Amino acid sequence: AEMLRILLVSLAACSVSAFAPASLPSLACRRAATCTGALSLRAANTEAEDVPRRSMVGGALAFGAAAAVGSPQEARAAEETMTISTTAGDMEFEFWPEVAPKTVESFKKLAKTGYFDGQAFHRVIKGFVIQGGDPNSKKGYGPSGTLEGADIGSVRKWGTGGPGFNLKAEFNPRKHEFGVLSMARSASPDSAGSQFFVCLGPLASLDNKYTTFGKMTKGDEVLKKIGSCKTVKGDYPYERQGIEKVTINGA
């Protein structure tokens, strides 16, 4: 308990640049992101009780592109599905290449290299989203798989990692609702890389401000279990919510 207290105090005192997750693209976060590509997802929910910490940052630019699935490549992409195997069970997703072709293509390429395997959902905001996709989340938890005995230096980096490139925003008409996949980003619309989030409910405040690119087809209870896990200040799961493996099916 004492080690956990020290960890929380240290994280609260750390500088913005050291642990600076920028919020979901236009979402405001308590800590402004100062690193290029910092992709932390702070919730900008319009629900009254959380309006102060989840307020919107105005002026998000929309780069919506709704491409029809017409080419053989897009047709094959639409047929492929994804399984995210977690410590809580499996979740299956369909992709939406017809509205976010480049995002879907990039995500699949990363998954096929094993990029996401061994990561964790490093941020869980109850009633809002679970966020993953940061390679820095492979390190940080203590020997017991909890924040007891955690590596503070590694935990401070959660929410700041990426694949080394950014994607052009593909904002589109698909809504943010329970089970929808969307890309996390910093204040710049074109700053998404690999960090993503899964919605825990309808989130109209995010529509046309983040790139939705798929939706869960199986695994509701798994998502709800992860989304209700115990968290500490900063929305970090107390116990590791592991992303054990991401598999592209039908590839």
Image: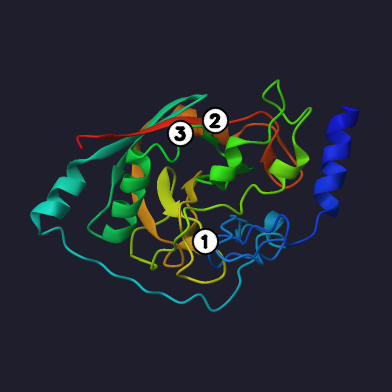
- Identified at 88% across, 36% down, the residue is 5
- Position of 26 with respect to 11 (left or right) is left
Would you name the residue on which mark 1 appears?
185
For mark 3, give the secondary structure.
loop
Q: Position of residue 200 (x, y in %)?
A: 51, 43
**Label 3, label 2: how far apart the Cα atoms are:** 9 Å
Tell me if residue 142 can be seen.
yes
Left of 146 or right of it: where is 104? left
- Front position among marks 3 and 2: 3
In the drawing, what numbered circle is on residue 242? 2
The local secondary structure at tag 1 comes to loop
Q: Kindly tell me whether residue 126 is visible in this rendering.
A: no
- Residue 31 x/y as whole percent: 72, 61
Which comes sooner in the sequence, label 3 or label 2?
3
User: Mark 3 and mark 1: span between their CA atoms?
Assistant: 21 Å
Q: Which residue is mark 3?
A: 117
Indicate the secondary structure of the residue bearing disc 2. Answer: strand
- Say above or below: 232 vs 149: below
